[in-house]
Amino acid sequence: MISRNRESHEVSVRSCIAAILAAALSLHAGTGCAQAYPAKVVRWIVPSSAGGGADTVTRLVANALPSILGQRVIVDNRAGASGNIGSELAAKSAPDGYTWLMINNAQAANVSMFKNLPYDLLRDFMAVTQVDSSPHMVVVHPSVPVKSMAELVRLAKAKPGALDYASAGLGTVTFLATEIFKADAGVNLRHVSYKGGGESLLSIVSGETAVYFSPLVVALPHMRTGRLRPLGGTSKTRTPLAADVPTVAESGYPNYEFSLWNGLLVPARTPKDIVAAIHAAVVAALNTPEVSKRFSEMGSRTVGSQPDEFRAFLAAEVEKLSRVIAKLKLSDEASK
């Protein structure tokens, strides 16, 4: 009975997608568009390197979309400049529904982190949906002689600046999560910036750096093999995937919390019916049993919010992170 109900649900979702795409075709018939959207391959830009958290999430959803959209969705990693290279490329792309951009907390922070951005996050994009939300995990290389957040803080205070922490770049989620904790704990960890999440993860696994506030999704495999030692989760409650690891809040810092979110944008002036079709397709992918199960296994919660809800959420995140950045005196100018 459960299997039959699931099949019925999937058929219903796909029927809804077909109806939306048919509507998009009829609305564009008068503009000379001869084919329904999408009529060609879609490019989904990830403004960070392959192997990072955003890349992993994007590929998971993208792999489920061909059977829904009837076209392939190719993931295009454009790392560099703390995500600004890929974001600028997407902002300046044609508003025709064939270029998507995956963003996270980092792009919301970049609005305040960088004083001369070549794009405007809220003006140059249209919101489609928040994809997911998940915690980070504070991990160290096994060679670091600490087994808890308290021990990490004691070591950092005993040897100020001696411990390196990796990040995917100035203003990225791994940078923000660490800097906020540094301020809470009053410790000095030396920042080592990499081009993207893949490179920063490799640095901690190899022992090149000592500490990493890693997205849970990419830390889990290395935690399970013992290549990384977990010290604390960044969410308010423990993740079921590492139930024996206390949260940072439990470890003496009750006000600390950091959740990673990913969301989908398209260039401004993309037709609203195309935005609706993209939204419906991505939400359908998130609701498929295979994708939903995989997100759960990664410790991530799928969202699938409406475009107006995600736009309001994004504006609130930009404002919230601007206050954090001002309080901690973090910016590209301050780092020079």
Image (cartoon, helix red, strand yellow):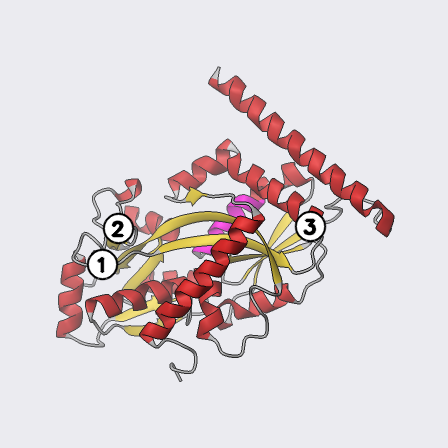
* Amino acid tagged 3: Lys
Badge 2: residue crowd in 10 Å (few <14, some 14–19, many ≥20)? few
Provide the major secondary structure of the magenta segment.
helix
Looking at the image, is mark 2 or mark 3 nearer the viewer?
3
Dot 2 or dot 1: first in sequence order is 1
Badge 3: residue crowd in 10 Å (few <14, some 14–19, many ≥20)? few
* Amino acid tagged 2: Gly
Q: Secondary structure at mark 1?
A: loop
Name the residue tied to disc 3.
272
Separation of residues labelled 2 and 3 (CA atoms): 48 Å
Count of all numbered marks drawn on residues in the image: 3
**Magenta stretch?**
53-62
From what the image shows, is residue 335 above or below residue 172?
below
Residue 185 horizontal side relative to residue 94, left or right: left
Asked whether the residues under the numbered discs 2 and 3 touch, taking CB atoms below 8 Å apart as contact, a structural biologist would say: no
Q: Secondary structure at mark 3?
A: helix
Looking at the image, is mark 3 or mark 1 nearer the viewer?
3
* Amino acid tagged 1: Pro
Asked whether the residues under the numbered discs 2 and 1 touch, taking CB atoms below 8 Å apart as contact, a structural biologist would say: yes
Name the residue tied to disc 1.
142
Quadrant location of the C terminus? bottom left
Outermost residue on the top side: it is 1
From what the image shows, is residue 188 above or below residue 22?
below
Residue positioned 27% across, 44% down in the render: 242
Q: Percent position (x, y) of residue 98?
A: 69, 54
Residue positioned 30% across, 51% down in the render: 235
| Residue 21: in magenta span | no
Q: Secondary structure at mark 2?
A: loop
Name the residue tied to disc 2.
226
Residue positioned 53% across, 63% down in the render: 47
Residue 70 horizontal side relative to residue 261, left or right: right
